[in-house]
Image (cartoon, helix red, strand yellow):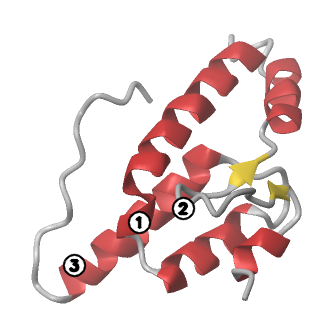
Amino acid sequence: MIPRYRTHPGFEPHRGGRRDGPDLKVEPSCRAAGIDGMITGRTSESCLNDEKSAREDLTKAWSSFSADDKNHCLSMVSTGGGPSYVELLSCLEMSRDAKLIAKGQPPAQMPATRKR
């Protein structure tokens, strides 16, 4: 059976059974962010760099997230605009951490290597 997240707009289906997360079309959103961000200094390049960094983090952690969280977050990031690895990763981390906190456990600690 094909996972639900592969049917969301902005996602590309995987070839060869990869299990490292979805392929998102972030370029259109980053182009728009670059145009809109000229005043604030936000460029398409900085947007793409953030997306690339988030994609790398997501690839490393993808298998650690529950299927329910993946489907929920993929639905969230595909609604109302272009998909984003940054938004997807944030959603997955918050969903995971909320479950841990509800169990009385501390939230997961992520390496402080990201520049966001």
Q: Amino acid at mark 1?
A: Ser
SS type, badge 2: loop
SS type, badge 3: helix
For disc 3, the neighbor class at 10 Å (few under 14, some 14 to 19, many from 20) is: some
Image depth: mark 1 or mark 2 in front: 2
Tag 1 near tag 2, CB within 8 Å: yes
Left or right: where 46 falls relative to 2: left
Judge by depth and name the residue closer to the eye, 98 or 5: 5
Tag 3 near tag 1, CB within 8 Å: no
For disc 2, the neighbor class at 10 Å (few under 14, some 14 to 19, many from 20) is: few
**Could you tell me how far apart the alpha carbons at marks 1 and 2 are, in whole angstroms?**
7 Å
Q: Amino acid at mark 3?
A: Leu
For residue 19, which numbered disc appears in the image? 2
Q: Is residue 47 above or below residue 85?
A: above
Q: Amino acid at mark 2?
A: Arg
Residue underneath mark 1: 63
Left or right: where 72 falls relative to 63: right
Judge by depth and name the residue closer to the eye, 26 or 115: 26
Is residue 40 visible in the rendered image? The answer is no
Mark positioned earlier in the residue sequence (3 or 1): 1
Q: Position of residue 66 (x, y in %)?
A: 43, 79
**Could you tell me how far apart the alpha carbons at marks 3 and 1 are, in whole angstroms?**
17 Å
Residue underneath mark 3: 100
Tag 3 near tag 2, CB within 8 Å: no
Image quadrant holding the C terminus, namely top left
Q: Residue at x 10, y 77 (%)?
A: 105
Is residue 5 visible in the rendered image? The answer is yes
For residue 39, which numbered disc appears in the image? none
Q: Position of residue 18 (x, y in %)?
A: 60, 58
